Image: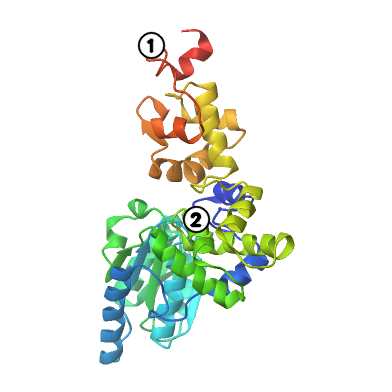
Amino acid sequence: MNWDDTTDAEAAAERLVGAVADGEDQAVEAALRPKDLHEFIGQEKVREQLDLVLRAARARGATADHVLLSGAPGLGKTTLSMIIAAEMEAPIRITSGPAIQHAGDLAAILSSLQEGEVLFLDEIHRMSRPAEEMLYMAMEDFRVDVVVGKGPGATAIPLELPPFTLVGATTRAGLLPPPLRDRFGFTAHMEFYGPSELERVIHRSAGLLDVEIDTTGAAEIAGRSRGTPRIANRLLRRVRDYAQVKADGLITQEIAGAALAVYEVDARGLDRLDRGVLEALLKLFGGGPVGLSTLAVAVGEERETVEEVAEPFLVREGLLARTPRGRVATPAAWAHLGLTPPSAQNAGKGQQDLFGT
């Protein structure tokens, strides 16, 4: 499993709207992946630009430029890497940054590549520094220097590589060093999906899964999918289960709403962890400001889990704000949970209330 870091993956594994799937879910998700750019829904600018890059490479009979894809989990970075390989009629090798902790690990992968092969490196920002420095030369000159021996007697043996295409994916593009980022011929940032795009994703997936769904049911699921196709597909499968057991199999707005209420996904897409963070911030700390570590203890989660798993969505939804003094709830958060904000004279005390100051 692999998300922003190991702790996040463990936390997300238990969330219906998390970014980590078990074996069965992974198999279904793989079956739902688009196979070419025309079948890929959303990301119009990225698709148009990438189509030009790949068509030009094919016309020249050359290997496609290296590609960097950035964006939140679940937006289609892995799918696009597979589409790149399919469009170039090339095999694909898949690995991840955390799996490459030594330069030798990377050298072994690079030396086994075939000409024109696509190497997909997920979470590229988490690769070790020695491997990263080796990758510079491999991307630019299709060559690596393998060091044999140690100390003064060590020698570097140059190893020529066949031309290949590196597709790097990252959820945190800011952590990539400029020398690595500059070696990619094409970079693209994946945006969150709008409701209409998610509805198209849901209708397509429903057809592949042989699920009956009407437009209102698709709209209800899309509205709770946090702008992410992976989450939309996962919610669709859970609503399908509910419709098969509790109804006649047809997914309508009413059925979708009832199903997602069972799975504790509310109308804005917040799940148990998201609401737990907001409730602690509002009920225990009067809306903040409160420190991240204190907030994490209050909800019984690791600090990294709150910061990397729950906070990005809450901030994007305008329910929580990060300030130099700590986390602060917005008026929208009070309204969403149906709570009354504190009076002006008591507002903004946050952690101070715990110490009677």
Q: Is residue 303 above or below residue 225?
A: above
Which is more toward the observer, 134 or 193?
193
**Residue 89 circle label:** none
Which residue, as the protein is rendered here, is positioned at the far right?
245
Which secondary structure lies at badge 2? loop
> Residue at the location (46% across, 72% down)?
79
In the displayed structure image, the side of residue 346 where residue 356 appears, left or right: right
How packed is label 2: few (under 14 Cα within 10 Å), some, or many (20 or more)? many
- Name the kind of residue labelled 1 in the image: Gln
Image quadrant containing the N terminus: bottom right
Which is more toward the observer, 347 or 290?
347
Which colour style is shown?
A: rainbow
Residue 224 locus on image (x, y percent): 50, 53
- Name the kind of residue labelled 2 in the image: Ser
Which is more toward the observer, 74 or 102?
74
Q: Is residue 355 above or below residue 14?
A: above
> Residue at the location (42% across, 13% down)?
346
Residue 70 locus on image (x, y percent): 37, 60
Which secondary structure lies at badge 1? loop
Residue 167 locus on image (x, y percent): 39, 71
> Residue at the location (57% across, 48% down)?
265
> Residue at the location (48% across, 79% down)?
92
Q: Which residue is mark 1?
A: 345
Q: Are marks 1 and 2 in contact (CB under 8 Å)?
A: no
| Marks 1 and 2, how far apart at CA | 38 Å
How packed is label 1: few (under 14 Cα within 10 Å), some, or many (20 or more)? few
**Residue 225 circle label:** 2
Residue 212 locus on image (x, y percent): 60, 72
